[in-house]
Image: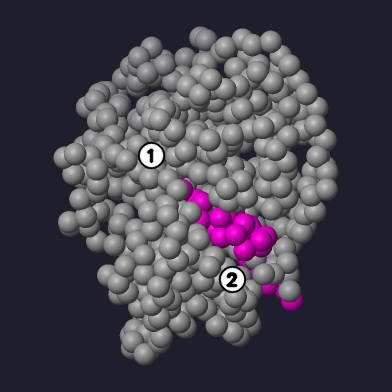
Amino acid sequence: MILVYIEQADKKIKKHSLEALTLAAQLAEALQSKVAAIVIGEVDNPEITAQYGADTTYLVSTTESDLLDTAARTKVWKKLVEHTGGSIVILPHSAGGKAIAGRLSVALQADVLSAVSQFVGLDGEKLLFKRPVFAGKGIATCAIQASRAVVTLLRNAISPQKREKPYRAQTIAISDVQPTVQLLQRQKTQGKVPLPEAEIVVSGGRGLKGPENWHLIEELADVLGAATACSRPVADAGWRPHSEHVGQTGITISPNLYIAIGISGAIQHLAGVNNSKTIVVINKDPEAPFFKAADYGIVGDLFEVVPKLIEALKRYKEKQ
Amino acid sequence: MKLLVCISVTPETTAPIRFTEDGQSLITEGINYIINPYDEWYALVRAIELKEQHGGQVDIVHVGPASHDVLLRKALAIGADAAYRIDLQPKDAWQAAYQIAHFAQDRAYDIIFAGKETIDYQGALVPGMVAEMLHLPFASFINYLEVEGQQVTVRCEIEGGYEEYRMPMPLVVSAAKGLAEQRIPNMRGIMMAKRKPLEVIPPQEVPAKSECIGFEKPPQRSSVKLIDPDNVEELVRLLHEEARVI
């Protein structure tokens, strides 16, 4: 049995989890196994899991306080693995997935591979996966044993594929995990798309000249329903919060569309964004290294180009 | 307070990444190595700050070869008190975590720090593994940590925000940006570091569990399509019709 952690936000199943179900279906095919979707807590449409290939969907009820702490979460997963006879656990390579992947692999005495982007195939008793290494400057093929493994899947690496299975749900109650930590508060930016999960990201660099010009980035992001990001010098100068810094020492993102405005494209910045599907660069310097890594480029003054682009996108959205 | 910082070593961010023709390994020639930035800039510095506030000692532990001693001296120059190097080039996260957990198990550390991930493999596995091996609480991706008595308050980065927890010591934490400000070693620190202890410890004999069997370069992007700045409608059209991302 391949167990897939179904991650949710506000009771909606995340697209990342549909990608994980698609990976699970590929593994199940190779290993002649079954896919189990693990839904912890309430979600609006758990039957979506069957559409994307879950043979069984386990609806797990447990008090939220049980899930706060990585040790408690690890115990919950260990019980789930024992209960379902699971052999492989697929977690999202998200904050929640990364927090428990290492712990859980030790608790299960399983092999573990994080940040996989592709399932290559079965080689004897081993599963082969590809994953980016050296900040996307290389791709490694890695082997782990198929009999017991924990895998975390990178966001936006696999396209979700429908498989339309009948929805079969089972309810499990898990108790008796004693968390040792206490949640004091949870802060989330309201109404905005979290940067790591955004399909479109608009990012600004030193070319913006100062935080007072950030309305250009925000307006463009608003039109596109995008998240905003920035380069390291911008975060270090305090123009934008650290949580927006993308790059090798900030956060790594892989959106469908990354629009870089006034960012020269230092190698450390590229490392954080080079898994984006499409990259657009707007910069007045035609020699900016970012153009070499871009799909589309505009050489021009961003203070002229960006307002025009905002207007053009507004007209396009109205036509839609 | 007794604090331990796990130090890993990675190629520097601008290092040329090339693989041997058979795709079996990284060509290390021409690569400079650095302390993993999350370990040095945030984990190590926050540990030193806590020692400055509360007293105690900061130890560092590294699993790696003798060629990394110069980097351990740098961590001592920044302000760690003693370095321990477990003499093994680890093949995977589990092997490294096992060595660290074995080292730390009888030394009664209050907090074990690590970076949130290394910037080369970005696995983010070792800190959680160490926590499970030692049966300790673990807070991942923290950008804030304060100590009050036998408790700590930490903030863990999550998508689009953070969660703030109170946790008991001892515990393991992994450090993200914002936890501290990078420190550059000064001359006095560098001189003092030469006299600080750096102990080499023989490794435990445990095999790795996973292995990387091949490496390749990522596929090249096709060359950039330049669009006239006076015709941004063309960009909108291409993003919709060709790239299909809007």
Q: Amino acid at mark 1?
A: Cys
The quarter of the picture where residue B75 lies is bottom left
The range drawn in magenta is B122-149
Q: Which residue is mark 1?
A: A142
**Side of A264 where A252 appears, left or right:** right
* Disc 2, SS: loop
Q: Position of residue B193 (x, y in %)?
A: 37, 85
At x 59%, y 42%, the residue is: A97
> Is A263 located above or below residue A88 in the figure?
below
* Relative to A2, A29 lies left or right: left
Q: Inspect the magenta stretch and tell me whether residue B137 lies in it.
A: yes
Above-or-below relation of A36 to A64: above
Q: Residue A221: image x %, image y %?
A: 51, 32
> Secondary structure under badge 1?
strand
Give the number of the disc on residue B105. 2
Q: Nearer the viewer, residue A12 or A318?
A: A12
As rendered, which of A43 and A176 lies closer to the eye? A176
Q: Residue at x 33, y 87 (%)?
A: B194
Quadrant placement of the N terminus of chain A: top right
